[in-house]
Image: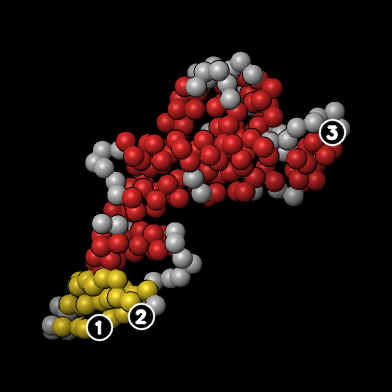
């Protein structure tokens, strides 16, 4: 396993405050068991969350073709959520440098999504606090941009997921699909579906299968909502 310094050098990161980097990987459980260590990474987590939100918002704002506010909101929430950040942390092996207490280690803390997302945010904050402000972009670009492109492709392919995530960014409610009409011969039917939020019809769609009709209804609704 490579050392932390080897990892930083490999990424081309210019570090003048290694103590802050080490703090980013120090979990509160480790501090509790090592009285000579004073600082955990919780304060860095808070700063890192803000830095990450700004980085992603700026990236989405600059993206061509331009994204609507709704699309930016949906994509940002997916790019900075716990599951995504934990997956990125595993892929770039950041979890290897995490300092955990014995109990936290035994209970699987090193592989817990919430803990991994927190350490990623703390590390981003530690990079932000270095003198070289290019560190954040240098580190995040190779990680976030491929994730973004993958999500964009998935969104274009799956409007049902896209619509549900957009709706849940403002409310915990779930949209429902209702078959309102089936037309044509039995060997070549056409289905017409509406998608609703409570009793409000958000969109309509037709298709040669119920699944396709639902996707088209979701696309119709999503297009109207983010316009």
Q: Residue at x 62, y 39 (%)?
A: 45
Q: Do the residues labelled 1 and 2 touch (CB within 8 Å)?
A: no
Residue 27 appears left or right of 127: right
Q: Picture coordinates of residue 117 (x, y %)?
A: 58, 43
Q: Picture coordinates of residue 140 (x, y %)?
A: 46, 32
Residue 102 appears left or right of 194: right
Q: Distance between the residues labelled 3 and 2?
A: 57 Å
Q: What element carries label 3?
A: loop
Q: Quadrant of the C terminus?
A: bottom left
Residue 106 appears left or right of 78: right
Q: What scheme was used to colour the molecule?
A: secondary structure
Q: Quadrant of residue 200?
A: bottom left
Q: Is mark 2 on a helix, strand or loop?
A: loop
Q: Which residue is drawn at 46% across and 70% down?
A: 173
Q: Can residue 165 be seen in this view?
A: yes
Q: Are marks 3 and 1 in contact (CB under 8 Å)?
A: no
Compared to 143, does 184 lie above or below?
Answer: below
Residue 61 appears left or right of 32: left
Label 1, residues with CA under 10 Å away: few <14, some 14-19, many ≥20: few
Q: Picture coordinates of residue 199 (x, y %)?
A: 36, 80
Q: Name the residue under label 2.
A: 199
Q: Mark 3 points at which residue?
A: 34
Q: Can residue 222 be seen in this view?
A: no
Label 3, residues with CA under 10 Å away: few <14, some 14-19, many ≥20: few
The disc at residue 180 is 1
Q: Are marks 3 and 2 in contact (CB under 8 Å)?
A: no
Q: Residue at x 28, y 53 (%)?
A: 156
């Amino acid at each position: 396993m490579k050392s932390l310094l080897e990892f930083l050098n490999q990424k081309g990161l210019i570090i003048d405050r290694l103590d802050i980097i080490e703090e980013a990987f120090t979990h509160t459980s480790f501090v509790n068991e090592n009285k000579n260590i004073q600082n955990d990474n919780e304060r860095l987590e808070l700063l890192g969350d803000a830095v990450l939100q700004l980085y992603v918002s700026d990236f989405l704002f600059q993206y061509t073709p331009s994204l609507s506010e709704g699309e930016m909101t949906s994509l940002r929430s997916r790019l900075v959520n716990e599951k995504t950040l934990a997956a990125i942390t595993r892929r770039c092996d950041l979890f290897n440098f995490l300092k955990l207490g014995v109990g936290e280690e035994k209970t699987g803390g090193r592989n817990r999504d919430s803990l991994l997302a927190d350490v990623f945010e703390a590390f981003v904050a530690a990079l932000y606090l270095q003198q070289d402000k290019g560190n954040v972009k240098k580190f995040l670009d190779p990680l976030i941009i491929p994730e973004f492109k993958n999500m964009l492709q998935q969104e274009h392919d799956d409007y049902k997921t896209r619509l549900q995530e957009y709706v849940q960014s403002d409310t915990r409610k779930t949209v429902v699909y209702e078959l309102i009409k089936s037309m044509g011969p039995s060997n070549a039917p056409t289905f017409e579906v509406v998608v609703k939020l409570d009793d409000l019809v958000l969109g309509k769609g037709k298709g040669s299968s119920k699944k396709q009709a639902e996707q088209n209804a979701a696309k119709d609704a999503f297009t109207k909502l983010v316009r």
